[in-house]
Each structure stands twice: as structure tokens, then as C-alpha cells.
Image (tube, helix red, strand yellow):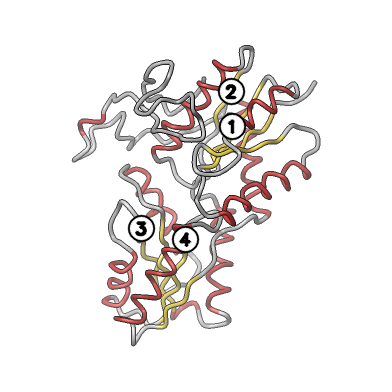
Amino acid sequence: MTPPALLLVGHGTRDEAGARAFRDFVAQLGAAHPELPVGGGFIELSPPPLADTVAAMAGAGARTFAAVPLMLVSAGHAKGDIPAALAREKQRHPGTSFAYGRPLGPHPGLLAVLERRVDEALAGADRAGATVLLVGRGSTDPDANAEVAKAARLLWEGRGYAGVETAFVSLAEPSVPAGLDRCLRLGARTVVVLPYFLFSGVLPDRVREQAAVWAAGQGADVDVRCADVIGPEPELAQLVMERYREAVAGDVRMNCDACVYRVAMPGFEDRVGLPQQPHHHPDDPSHAHGGHPHGGQGHTHAHSH
């Protein structure tokens, strides 16, 4: 019996190198697991669109899918857009079913990769003299931003850094310059700016650019170094397979305790119970702007489809 197909779902990027890194990672994972069908697609911006990937896999005989969002935090795309896209594909391909795994999160394997990236940037310099600025994408979802702060704290524990601070490149504060200002006020003399991203792209490039501008203008007394993104490391592949197995087994432990769609968080009370409306995906012409073609979906953290 063929096991459920592994469907990797990415957000997409206007950076071709980043999109290619995703596609290469999907190909590598497929080569490493010939026992199961493996495919990947994007919800916007980059080819292949998720709809094309599902159509190709369904055409090759896949009927049961376990979808893993290749995303670090549970923000709007993971909570709303991807579940809606999977529901749409189920409508398009009668007889198919989709289990949905959880995002990658601050897993110990990824923390080990982040630690290596910091060591690469330090190039032998003492960890005790280094402050790390972990820079996330940023979201209007406070729970997603809190996950980045959690990753920063877990990265600090037991690794001997002077400190680990948090910043965001968009949609949330502190910004990269504000995060560097904070490091300076705390007395940092060496700061490693660590992009909390899986692959290269427009936003990681922006992180490096903003750090370089700050260093040139206000960081004369600070040695600012930029680390690389996580990349297609073995730990990432192992974690994706762990999330796949969880989805197949139905063991999906979403964090609902601080979700703005379930809990009245200060400043976000109007979102409780709000139906999730995926935004327009230009690569999917059947998806009308502003809503789901089959009607809005209430937020359920996508425990099942």
C-alpha cells in the first residue's frame, strides 16, 4: 500500500534563488524517501503553484496527502491560507483527502542549525562576548511574534552568548535598527544578526541591508556580523519528516492557548471567531480576491480537512 503523499507548502518569494532552494529541498527529500510520493508548491509568488503540484500528484495516483507547511511560525498563512487552499484542492480532486501538519517551530534541530550559523559568523570569536539578534519575518498575529521570542530564549539557554535579542523585518516591532539600538544600549560590542528564515529571499536580504546601514551610521563601536539563513540542512529534512509522521498519525498539537481567533488578546478582541479569508493568490485564477470560492471557513487551526 502506498503511504500518504508528502506535500510541502511554501509561501513563495520574488527571489528566484530562494524559490529554487525550496524546489531543490523538495527534490532532495523525495530522493531520500523513494518509498513515498513527495511534492511541493507555493501559495503565491513562485512556481510551481500548489494547485499544479496537487494536480500532478493526483494525476499520478495520489489520493491521500499529508501537507506540511514549510514555515517557522503559525501566522496567517499557516492558520488560514494553506488550510483554505487544501480545502480548495479537495473540491477540485474528488476522492482525495488532506491531513495538515503543524509549522516547524523552534525545534531543537533547528536551534542547533541556528547555533552553527552564529558560530560561522563569529569565526572563532568568543561566544561570551557576542549578542545575537534573532530577526523574524514579523506578523500582525501576536502569537506568531511570540514564537520568535520563544526561539530566541531557547537559543540563549545553555549556549554561552552574552544575550539573544529579538527583532522583526516587517509588520512588527522592534525593527532591525531598533533591535540593534537595544543591543548597543545593553553594552553589546559584537552583534550577530541572525535571520530566522529557512531560505534566502527578499526579506533576509533586507535584514542584511538594514544591519549594514545601521552599522555604517550608528554602530561605529559595535562589530556587526550577519549570519546565514537556516538552509537545507539535515536537521530540517528530519524535522519535515517528523511533522509528516505526526500528520499521518493525526497527532497534530497546534498551539491554541494564545490564538487571536480563539482568545481575546488585548488589542485583537475583534478577531475572536473571525472566519479565515485567504488573500488573493495570482497564480490561482480560480481564487477570487477577498474570499474562498466555496465560502469562508471558520478558524480551526486546521486540525483536519
Q: Amino acid at mark 2?
A: Phe
Residue 130: x and y in percent read 44, 77
Name the residue beneath numbered marker 1: 67
Label 2 vs label 3: CA separation? 32 Å
4 and 2 marks in contact (CB < 8 Å): no
Which of the 4 image quadrants contains residue 212?
Answer: bottom left
| Mark before the other along the chain sequence, 2 or 3 | 2
- Residue furthest to the bottom: 221
Residue 37: x and y in percent read 74, 32
Label 1 vs label 3: CA separation? 27 Å
| Mark before the other along the chain sequence, 1 or 3 | 1
| Mark before the other along the chain sequence, 4 or 2 | 2
Name the residue beneath numbered marker 4: 204
Q: Secondary structure at mark 3?
A: strand
Residue drawn at x 54%, y 49% as measured from the top left: 107
**Residue 163 falls left or right of residue 285:** left
Name the residue beneath numbered marker 3: 168
Q: Amino acid at mark 1?
A: Ala
Q: Secondary structure at mark 4?
A: helix
